[in-house]
């Protein structure tokens, strides 16, 4: 088994997770201005990504620049990993490739704890990406604990690049935000991302 093979039923049975869907997690989170660089980049890449409309190009042209901006907003105190193997416990199916990982460490040569966010990139079907993202969040939780970092909350994001849904994992409770955020409100998305990394406003 791997992250991509999990279903909601697998997650609730194997890891005793409770899935909660009726939460407005970030409505009060303030927006954060983006840099001129990201504004100009998205102006150039958005129409191109929508025209080509593959998961790979959405990831490269939309998601990656936003996460590079996030790293800049954090003063490069976070690390960003893309398309890396994140195998934590193969016996439990917690193995496979993660699209993007954000860790609270400037170390960029290897993944180090604590991991804050797991990103799952999808072409169109956001809901279909939830189980895979949650499984990787469980792995991140266990990775942090193994490295003796007690992080109360692991966050997940399932995104098409234009549409963004956020998740929280606290102990055995998964909360899925009932709001979907869109790239035309990129300052709100950046506000949520920076709030997760603990950047002061």
Image (spheres, helix red, strand yellow):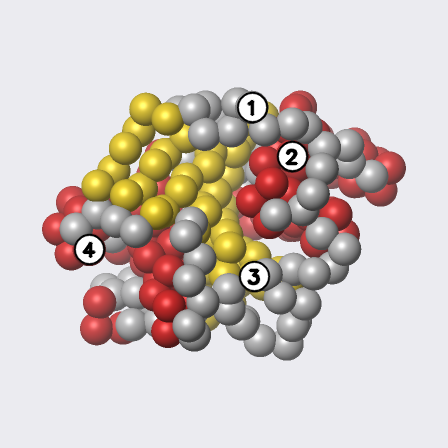
Say above or below: 14 vs 106.
above
Q: Which residue is mark 4?
A: 15
Q: Which residue is mark 3?
A: 103
Q: Which residue is mark 2?
A: 191
Q: Quadrant of residue 181?
A: top right
Specify which label sits upstream in the sequence, 3 or 1: 1
Q: Are marks 4 and 2 in contact (CB under 8 Å)?
A: no
Label 1 Cα neighbours within 10 Å, binned few <14 / some 14-19 / many ≥20? few
* Distance from the alpha carbon under mark 2 to that under mark 3: 17 Å
- Does residue 10 appear to the left or right of 105 in the view shown? left
Specify which label sits upstream in the sequence, 3 or 4: 4
Q: Are marks 3 and 4 in contact (CB under 8 Å)?
A: no
Residue, far left:
13
Nearer the camera: disc 3 or disc 1:
1
User: Picture coordinates of residue 172 (x, y %)?
Assistant: 26, 49
Label 2 Cα neighbours within 10 Å, binned few <14 / some 14-19 / many ≥20? many
Give the secondary structure at mark 3.
Answer: strand
* Distance from the alpha carbon under mark 2 to that under mark 1: 10 Å
Q: Name the residue located 30 percent from the left edge and 29 percent from the top edge.
A: 21
């Amino acid at each position: 088994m791997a992250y991509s093979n999990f279903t909601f039923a697998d997650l609730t049975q194997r890891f005793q997770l409770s899935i909660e869907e009726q939460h407005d997690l970030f409505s009060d989170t303030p927006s954060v201005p983006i840099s001129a660089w990201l504004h100009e980049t998205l102006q150039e890449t958005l129409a191109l990504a929508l025209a080509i409309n593959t998961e790979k190009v959405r990831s490269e042209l939309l998601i990656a620049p936003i996460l590079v901006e996030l790293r800049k907003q954090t003063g490069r105190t976070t690390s960003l990993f893309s398309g890396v193997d994140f195998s934590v416990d193969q016996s439990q199916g917690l193995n496979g490739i993660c699209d993007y990982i954000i860790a609270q460490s400037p170390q960029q040569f290897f993944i180090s704890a604590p991991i804050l966010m797991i990103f799952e990139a999808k072409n169109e079907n956001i809901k279909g990406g939830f189980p895979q993202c949650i499984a990787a969040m469980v792995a991140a939780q266990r990775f942090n604990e193994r490295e003796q970092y007690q992080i109360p909350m692991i966050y997940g994001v399932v995104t098409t690049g234009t549409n963004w849904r956020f998740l929280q994992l606290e102990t055995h409770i998964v909360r899925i935000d009932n709001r979907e955020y869109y790239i035309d409100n990129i300052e709100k998305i950046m506000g949520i991302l920076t709030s997760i990394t603990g950047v002061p406003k």
